[in-house]
Image (cartoon, rainbow, N blue to C red):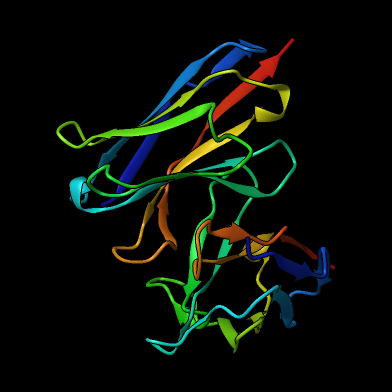
Amino acid sequence: QVQLVESGGGVVQTGRSLRLSCAASGFTFRTYGMHWVRQAPGKGLEWVAFMSYDGRNKYYADSVKGRFTISRDNSNNTLYLQLNGLRAEDTAVYYCAKREYNWNYLDYWGQGTLVTVSS
Amino acid sequence: DIVLTQSPDSLAVSLGERATFNCKSSQSVLYTSVNRNCLAWYQQKPGQPPKLLISWASTRESGVPDRFSGSGSGTDFTLTITSLQAEDVAVYYCQQYYSDPCTFGQGTKLEIK
């Protein structure tokens, strides 16, 4: 069965960095595009970033462009999100999610990892 | 970016009754080459990640009870729960995948009356 397990969250000061990981299993990771979606406390879902199956294409939300970097290691079935220049408004649960093969609806989600940015 | 507006923001329905959620898109999400609407619905229960219920506006995912149904086309979509069960208490989100970036509605919170 498909499993996505995020890690790397924690409490960090404003301006610092963090790297999130998402370990994937139960499907052929190297053939699927992957997304990061976040959810601030008590708020709705916000798409953050996407990377194609082969890493050639990546897209970011305007709110994180230039600060966050998505990457993947297909040999280790892992997706990453590097968070730099963190701000208070980046405080959220970060989910990794698998897209359907050809379309960007998200058929499997991880449990999420909480990032708290404090001053 | 395509903006999705859900209504109402919250909904209280009695057990066994019908619950209806609306999602309006700022532009059509009908992908004409495949004649399908690029609109999904997700359910998020407290403390859990979202779960995909419906894709292509009306295609139920495997294992989703048939009391959940989706309808609509173009810019206006509806998710219906025909006979509300206690376990359906959640926030429901629509999402468009017609164009990048994919975007979500703000969600509708469902409670038991």
Q: Nearer the viewer, residue A11 or B44?
A: A11
Name the residue at 60% across, 86% down: B74
| Residue B97 position (above or below residue A34) | below
Q: Where is residue B81 in the image (x, y as percent from the top left)?
A: 64, 79
- The residue positioned 46% from the left and 72% from the top of the image is B64
Q: Which residue lies furthest to the left in this view?
A: A75
Which residue does the image show at 56% across and 78% down from the upper left?
Answer: B29
Of B35 and A113, nearer the camera is B35
Q: Quadrant of the C terminus of chain A?
A: top right
Residue at 65 percent across and 63 percent down: it is B92
Position of residue A111 in the picture relative to residue B69 (left or right): left
* Image position, residue A100 (x, y; %): 34, 62
What is the number of callouts on the image?
0
Residue A53 x %, y %: 25, 49
Q: Where is residue A87 in the image (x, y as percent from the top left)?
A: 68, 21
A7 above or below B71?
above
Q: Quadrant of residue B23?
A: bottom right
Quarter occupied by residue B71: bottom right
Relative placement, left or right, of B65 versus B62 is right
Horizontal side, residue A22 vs residue A27: left or right: right
